[in-house]
């Protein structure tokens, strides 16, 4: 059995995918009424048109939901709280399915798991993916990162699914940062398109944003090849170019001067602030991230941000 903790769109989509692969899946929802409704109606309102397979059981009973393989499909900024509230997760294999950097500690998901539950076996599942695509059975490729190669091989086989192709790596730092930092660049790209700056500006932001991602990742010990793979370049390409991306849509709203639904989780906003703070301490040049933070905090207008970026001294690529 596989456990998915977090019954949002992405957690539900993963549960559906693994059930189609022949597994029995327990999907844990924090809200008891929501769990009851999903269990009886066999659908999640966040994934319209997707029927939960019979082998997916939805529950609000945390203890009953646990198995040998546990996927943590909760927002990055709520991951620590979940782990602290449930010490019974210690000693288990925990696969983070969130993308971001924790405010305050500036840690990624694997590092947070290690920090709170050092006896757990941490991993992260990341890469270019939208919940709706996974739930519909569309082909998707993901990266599974875990420190120990033998653990990665075992989990890779365990998580086989008809529409999910999973690649593995031991570079958890690179996988964490690729999935986190691309959300910041997606916000920047959304701002550019929303403000009417055009596709050429978006392409420039994606390219130079990727350079920023590489600079921080390598400074923190990541392998360059990891960022060139699914968890970095692949996820960056998807997130910066599709309206399905919450971070991109958030940027579009900023660029257009429109309000954005506050109930929608935008991991990139918190990640931008955390990454910017770390970059300053480590003296890493990340001008696009700095501009996104300044825009979020109201200290910089969008046109001024673009002029600032264009006015930077000429340099080699």
Image (spheres, helix red, strand yellow):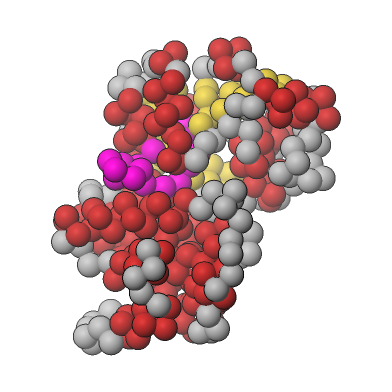
Residue 282 in picture, x, y percent from top left: 16, 56
| 311 and 66: which is toward the camera | 311
User: Which quarter of the rendered picture does the C terminus lie within?
Assistant: bottom left
Residue 100 in picture, x, y percent from top left: 41, 47
User: Which quarter of the rendered picture does the N terminus lie within?
Assistant: top right
Q: Is residue 84 magenta?
A: no
| 55 and 264: which is toward the camera | 264
Up the image or down, 132 lies above or below 125; here it is below
Q: At 16% across and 55% down in the image, what residue appears?
A: 281
Q: Which residues are magenta?
A: 95-109
Residue 15 in picture, x, y percent from top left: 66, 32
Q: At 28% across and 87% down in the image, what residue appears?
A: 311
Q: Which picture quadrant has residue 242? A: bottom right
Q: Is residue 97 magenta?
A: yes
Report the number of numbered marks. Answer: 0
Q: Is residue 9 visible to the viewer in this orientation of the structure?
A: yes
Left/right of residue 20 with respect to residue 268 in the rendered view:
right
Q: At 42% across and 74% down in the image, what residue appears?
A: 205
Q: Is residue 168 visible to the viewer in this orientation of the structure?
A: no
| 175 and 114: which is toward the camera | 114
Up the image or down, 81 lies above or below 187; here it is above
Left/right of residue 199 with respect to residue 76 in the rendered view:
right
Up the image or down, 111 lies above or below 243; here it is above
Q: Main secondary structure of the magenta part?
A: loop
Q: At 23% across and 58% down in the image, what residue appears?
A: 279
Up the image or down, 196 lies above or below 187; here it is below
Residue 195 in picture, x, y percent from top left: 53, 80
């Amino acid at each position: 059995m596989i456990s998915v903790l977090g019954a949002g769109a992405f957690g539900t989509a993963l549960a559906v995918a693994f059930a189609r692969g022949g597994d029995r899946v327990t999907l844990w929802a924090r809200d008891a009424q929501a769990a009851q409704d999903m269990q009886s109606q066999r659908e999640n309102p966040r994934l319209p048109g997707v029927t939960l397979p019979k082998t997916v059981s939805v529950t609000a009973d945390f203890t009953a939901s646990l198995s040998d393989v546990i996927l943590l499909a909760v927002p990055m900024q709520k991951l620590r709280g979940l782990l602290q509230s449930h010490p019974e997760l210690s000693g288990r294999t925990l696969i983070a399915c969130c993308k971001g950097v924790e405010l305050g500690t500036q840690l990624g998901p694997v590092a947070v798991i290690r920090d709170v539950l050092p006896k757990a076996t941490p991993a992260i599942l990341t890469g270019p993916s939208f919940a709706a695509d996974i739930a519909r059975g569309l082909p998707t490729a993901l990266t599974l990162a875990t420190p120990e190669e033998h653990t990665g091989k075992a989990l890779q086989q365990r998580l086989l699914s008809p529409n999910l192709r999973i690649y593995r790596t031991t570079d958890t730092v690179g996988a964490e940062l690729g999935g986190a930092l691309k959300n910041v660049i997606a916000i920047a790209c959304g701002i550019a398109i929303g403000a009417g700056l055009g596709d050429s500006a978006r392409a420039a932001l994606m390219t130079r944003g990727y350079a920023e991602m590489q600079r921080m990742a390598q400074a923190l010990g990541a392998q360059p090849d990891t960022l060139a793979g699914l968890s970095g370049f692949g996820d960056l390409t998807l997130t910066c170019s599709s309206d399905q991306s919450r971070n991109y849509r958030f940027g579009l709203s900023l660029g257009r001067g429109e309000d954005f639904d506050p109930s929608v989780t935008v991991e990139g906003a918190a990640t931008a602030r955390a990454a910017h703070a770390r970059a300053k301490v480590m003296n890493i040049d990340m001008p696009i991230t700095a501009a996104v933070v300044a825009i979020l905090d109201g200290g910089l207008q969008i046109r001024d941000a673009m002029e600032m970026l264009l006015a930077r001294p000429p340099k080699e690529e």
